[in-house]
Amino acid sequence: MDSVRTCVACRKRAPRTELLRVALQDGRLVADDRAVLPGRGAWVHPTAQCLDRAVSRGMFARALKVSGKPDASPLENRLKTLMDN
């Protein structure tokens, strides 16, 4: 059985396979496709709506327990690539 996670943006619960794990590396948010990066992870639906909401409201920083606003550009670029395909 697939474990269930909660999207940090919309707060809806979904199987891990439907969500994208986001981790912090060198102050930047990165997509952790295989869920293997060390440290805390935040889960989000791989949609523009959920990503924009999470970034604009600082939900990744809260979920990852970091102060300040992490750089979301690597994650946004990665998701744009995913959504274009």
Image (cartoon, grey):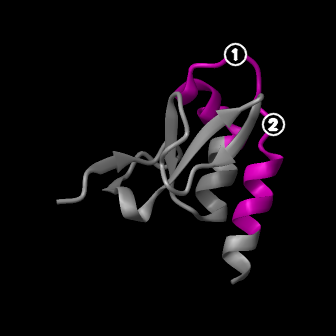
- Which segment is the magenta one? 55-80
Q: Answer whether residue 71 is magenta in the image.
A: yes
Up the image or down, 39 lies above or below 57; here it is above
Up the image or down, 23 lies above or below 44; here it is above
Q: Answer whether residue 76 is magenta in the image.
A: yes
The residue furthest left is 1
Up the image or down, 27 lies above or below 37; here it is above
Residue indicated by mark 1: 67
Residue drawn at x 66%, y 33% as measured from the top left: 24
Residue drawn at x 33%, y 57% as measured from the top left: 14
Residue drawn at x 57%, y 20% as measured from the top left: 65
Looking at the rendered structure, the kind of residue marked 1 is Ser
Residue 22 percent across, percent down from the top left: 58, 44
Q: Which numbered dot is residue 50? A: none
Main secondary-structure element of the magenta-colored stretch: helix
Residue indicated by mark 2: 71
Task: Determine the secondary structure under disc 1.
Answer: loop
Position of the C terminus by quadrant: bottom right
**Residue 29, image quadrant:** top right
Residue 47 lies left or right of residue 35; in this view the side is right
Residue 52 lies left or right of residue 8; in this view the side is right
Position of the N terminus by quadrant: bottom left
Looking at the rendered structure, the kind of residue marked 2 is Asp
Disc 2 to disc 1, C-alpha distance: 12 Å
Residue 64 lies left or right of residue 4; in this view the side is right
Up the image or down, 53 lies above or below 48; here it is above
Task: Determine the secondary structure under disc 2.
Answer: loop
Residue drawn at x 73%, y 80% as measured from the top left: 84
Residue 56 lies left or right of residue 7; in this view the side is right
Which residue is at the front of the view, 61 or 22?
22
